[in-house]
Amino acid sequence: MHLLVKLSTTLRDHVPDYQPNPGLELSDIPEESTVAQVAAGLNIPAEEIKIVMINGRQCALEDVLRDGDRLALFPAVGGG
Amino acid sequence: MSFEFRILRVDMAARTCTFEPVPQEYTGLGGRALTSTIVAREVDPTCTPLGPHNKLVFAPGLLGATNSPNSNRLSVGCKSPLTGGIKESNAGGQPGGHLAKLGILAIIVENMAPEGEWWQLELGKDKACLVPSTVTGLNNFDAVAKLVEHYGDKCSYITVGRAGEVKLTAASIACTDRELRPMRHAGRGGVGAVMGAKGLKAIIVNPEGGEAAPLVDADAFRSASKRFAKALAEHPITSKGLAQYGTAVLVNILQEAGGLPTKNFTVGQFAEHENLSGETLNKLTKERGGEGKVAHGCMSGCVIRCSGILPDKKGKFQSKWPEYETLWCFGPHSGISDLDKVSRFDYMCDDFGVDTIDVGVAVGVAMAGGGIPYGDADAALAAVAQISEGTPLGRVLGCGTATTGRVFGVRRVPCVKGQSLPAYDPRAVKGVGVTYATTPMGADHTAGYAVTANILACGGKVDPLKKEGQIELSRNLQVATASVDSVGLCLFTAFAILDVPDALPAIVDMLNAKFGWKMTGDDVVTLGQRILTTEIDFNRKAGIGIGQDRLPDFFTDEPVAPHNTNFDFTNEELATVFNWRDEVKELEKNRK
C-alpha cells in the first residue's frame, strides 16, 4: 500500500535526504502494517516518538495503517 | 535585616515617588496575584481605562531575585483599555529580576501627568525619581539605545514606543533582554496605552547595590531549586525542544492537527506552512550564521532558551525568532508565507510597541474586509509601518482586531471581550476554545493552555475534536496558570510541571523555604482560584457579565476544514468552568 509520512524536528535526522515538502512517499508497504512497523522500517526509534497522527487524528504506535493514509510522527514538542 | 520588600507608589500628577511598607492585604503575594489584587482594591472597575483613576501596576513574582531557574518574569496589571476588564500581561527580559533585587514588591503608577508632558522614572537602590523624558517621540529601539548611552549597559529598561504615546489599545510595554534589546513585551490588552496615558515614557532600573532576596531556609531553598532545575533538564520540551526550534515548533503540529487558523479562521490548514516552521527557523539561522543564535535565553536564570535570534541574509541581526503566534497571525491567517517578511513585522511591532497578536490578527481581518490585499506581504508591512506614523489606518490597526473589524465592516471578527484569538482554531482544539471564551483576560491561550493535552500529549490526553473533558481541563489549567503567573515563572516551565512529578513539589518547597511558609500543593490550587475570583469579580463590577464568556457565533455556525467540526459548547456548559463561584452554583440550582 501507499503512505505519505511527515516527520517533525529531530525525527527528520533519522531519514537521510528527508524533504519536508512533500514528505516521504512510501509505496510497497505491506497491508496491515502498524505505525510501529513503518517507523522501524525508517530506522526511527519508537522511544523518540511521542505523538502519532493518522490523517490528522491522534493515534497509537500499534494502530494499523490503511492504503493512502497520511502518517505524521512527532517527538515531544511544545511552545505557546 | 537590611533587605525589606516595599511598594513604590508613583503619582504622575504630583510627581512624587514614595516607598511604602507592604500593607497586610498585599503580603505573601507576587506577580499576577499581586497586580490583580492591587487593581481590584485600588481601581474603580467602572473608571475610564485611559483616565486618571486607572492604575498601572508592575510586580515581579514570588521567586524573583532568587536562584530558581526561569523565575524573573514581570507582571503588569491595570484595567484594560482593550477589554474594559482587568488585565495581567507578563513579560520576560531583565527588569523583573532587577526590580526584585531592589526589594520592590510592586510599582503602582497612579494619576496622570499634565497633557503633553512625558517623564521617565529612574530607579535604583532606595532611590526613585521622575525626570523629564529624554526619549519622547522615539520608538523602542532608538529610545533604549539613547537611554543606554546615558544610564549605561548595567541597567534594564521598560519603555513604550509611539503606539503607547498615542494610546493605541493594542500598545505593549517593552522590557529589555540581556543584550539590551526591547524585545520582551507585556503584549496583551493595551497595557502600553495605559503607561502612555500616565505620561510615563520609560522606567530605568539600575540593579546596582541590589541583592538576592533573603531566604528563611537557604539550604532547603538550594536543594528545592536544584530539583526544579533537574525537572526542567529532564523534560524534552524544556531541555531541548524549545531551545532548538523556538515556539515556532508548533506550526507543523497544528497544521497536521488541522488547527492552524488560515485566512481569517476560514480553514484549519495552510499549504505553505513549512516555510514558517521551527525547523525552517533553525535551519536558516544556522545557514546564515553571523549574529544569528539558536538557543537564546531572554532573561537571567533561563534554562529553556526559546528566544533565538534570526539573522538577515548577510548574517546581521534581523529580529528575535518570531513566536509561533506572530508567525501565525502575519502568516497563515494573513496568507503570507515569507519568513523574512514575518520577521520584519515582528521587529516593527517590538519597535513601535504593539501586541503582535492583536495587530497581526487585525492585518488578516483588514484583508477580509478589503482594506489590504489578501496575502500581500509588502502591502501589509506598509500598512503596519503606518502605526508609527500615526496615520488613520495605522491607528486603526494599532487599536487591534476588534477596532479593525468594525472599521472594515468584517463579519468574522475573532475576538472575545475585545481581545483577539491566538493561533489555535477553537473548533479543532476545543479545550483552548473553552479558555478563550471564559478567561477574564479576553481571548488568551496562555490563560489555560489546553493545547497541552489536546495536541501535545502533555499532562494527559484529551481528544481536541470532542467536548468530553475540555471544561475540566480548561478549569484546571486556568487555576494552575494563575498560580504560575504569580510565582514569576515562565509559563513554559508548565510542560515540566505537567509531566515531571517532582516539579510542582519543588516549586512549593522553594516558596516554603523562601518565606517560611507551610504551603502544600492544594494551597496552589486555592491561590489560583482566589486570583481568578478577584479578577472575575472586578469584571462583573466593570459590567462584563457571564454572558460575555462566549466565542463569536461564526465558530458555532461554521464548521472548519479539514475535520469539519464546530465549537459546540452550550452557554450552560461554558458557565460551569468556574464552578466554585456562587453565581455558577446559583445558575446550576435554577436549572434543576
Image: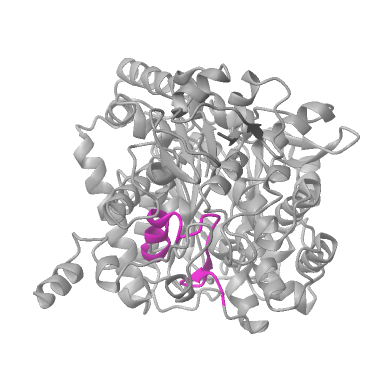
Horizontally, residue B55 falls left or right of residue B182, namely left
> Looking at the image, which residue is at 72% across and 72% down?
B367
> Looking at the image, which residue is at 45% across and 39% down?
B456
The one of B217 and A15 positioned closer to us in this rendering: A15
Q: Is residue B430 magenta?
A: yes
Say if residue B70 shows up in the picture: yes
Residue B214: image quadrant is: top left
Q: How is the image coloured?
A: one colour
Q: Is residue A68 magenta?
A: no
Report x, y in % for residue A70.
55, 41
Quadrant containing the C terminus of chain B is bottom left
Compared to residue B200, the image places residue B28 above or below, namely above
Residue B390: image quadrant is: bottom right
Q: Which residues are magenta?
A: B412-438
The one of B48 and B267 positioned closer to us in this rendering: B267
Report x, y in % for residue B217.
29, 21
Compared to residue B52, the image places residue B482 above or below, namely above
> Looking at the image, which residue is at 67% across and 41% down?
B277
The one of B413 and B199 positioned closer to us in this rendering: B413
Horizontally, residue B123 falls left or right of residue B22, namely right
Report x, y in % for residue B260.
57, 54
Quadrant containing the N terminus of chain B is top left
Compared to residue B182, the image places residue B38 above or below, namely below
Horizontally, residue B203 falls left or right of residue B545, namely right
Report x, y in % for residue B568.
36, 67
